[in-house]
Amino acid sequence: MNQKNVVLFIAGILFGFGLAFGGMSKPETVLSFLSLEDYGLLVLMFSATGVNFFAINVIPRFMEKPLLGGEWKPRERKFGKHTLIGSIIFGIGWGLSGQCPGSAISSIGIGNLPVLVGIAGMFAGAYVMGRWFS
Amino acid sequence: MFPIGINSYLNGGVVIGVAVSFVYILTGTHATQSSIFTTTLSYFTKLPFFQRQVYLDSRVWRLYFASGVILGALVYTLTISPDGFWVTGLPLWKLGLGGFLVGFGTRLSRGCTSGHGISGLASLSVTSLYAVITFIGMGIITVIVVRTAGL
């Protein structure tokens, strides 16, 4: 197991712990946000983004490159119609099921086994998308 | 606005932020979620889309990452969770159909709540800002439609 895989495994444990702690592993929590009954998910999103903002924008001023090598590269994607159409379709699926990729994967860990049907759906959706563009 | 308070949300968010920052500071990689469906499919299909180098290069660490995510949620459940194990009340058709749309949509827009949300917004990406506004807006509209239709 190389270093990077170890780093990602440890980070995964933290990420999954955080998703469960913040309640996002439960589709019902996501739906309580999207129905505007509980704005807590915005707090979760802004706190996670805030910490990561520091890592991406401040840390590189004091360190030449990442500790294990590689380079600093903020995440940028070109905007296009696929961004918009994809986000619309994702939003519909999110509102219908209360699941997004990370929250669904973490949901297995809280014992929510019906989520496996949702994850199977995500694989199918990713396959159809990839097949369409092959 | 916050019927169960903000502490669990704030703590969960900070832990998630620490997780993605840890990966970025050590490796310069953005630890995001939705690509795992595409990269894992690369083991099972020879279609050229799935065999792109960027997917082959990241498919192993994404599996380690996802395994960690499952384990981390399990650790939470077995330690400080007030509920213990928990199962959703949503019907399977919503999970399956919703999952399909989530898989298709996130791959088409190249990002989900973590990629466009946590990593994209922290990178000050305008594309990600548009994406986040769009999927939250559509999510809200969808919930209204679903409830109005009595589904």
Image (cartoon, rainbow, N blue to C red):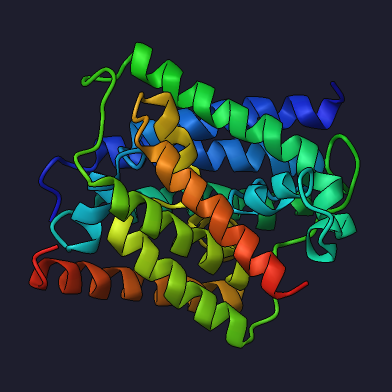
A117 or B24: which is nearer to us?
A117
Question: Eyeballing the image, is B47 above or below A50?
Answer: below
Q: Position of residue B148 (x, y in %)?
A: 9, 72
Quadrant assignment for the C terminus of chain B: bottom left
- Judge from the rendering whether residue A34 lies leftward or rightward of residue A73; answer left or right: left
Question: Eyeballing the image, is A24 above or below B100?
Answer: above
Q: Please say whether residue A76 is visible from this viewpoint.
A: no
Q: Position of residue B71 (x, y in %)?
A: 52, 21
Q: Residue at x 38, y 58 (%)?
A: B97
Q: Residue furthest toward the bottom?
A: A81
Q: Residue at x 89, y 47 (%)?
A: A70
- Judge from the rendering whether residue B75 lies leftward or rightward of residue B38; answer left or right: left
Question: Eyeballing the image, is B32 above or below B126?
Answer: above
Q: Please say whether residue B68 is visible from this viewpoint.
A: yes
Q: Position of residue B141 (x, y in %)?
A: 25, 75
The total of numbered circles placed on residues is 0
Q: Residue furthest toward the top?
A: B79
B56 or B115: which is nearer to us?
B56
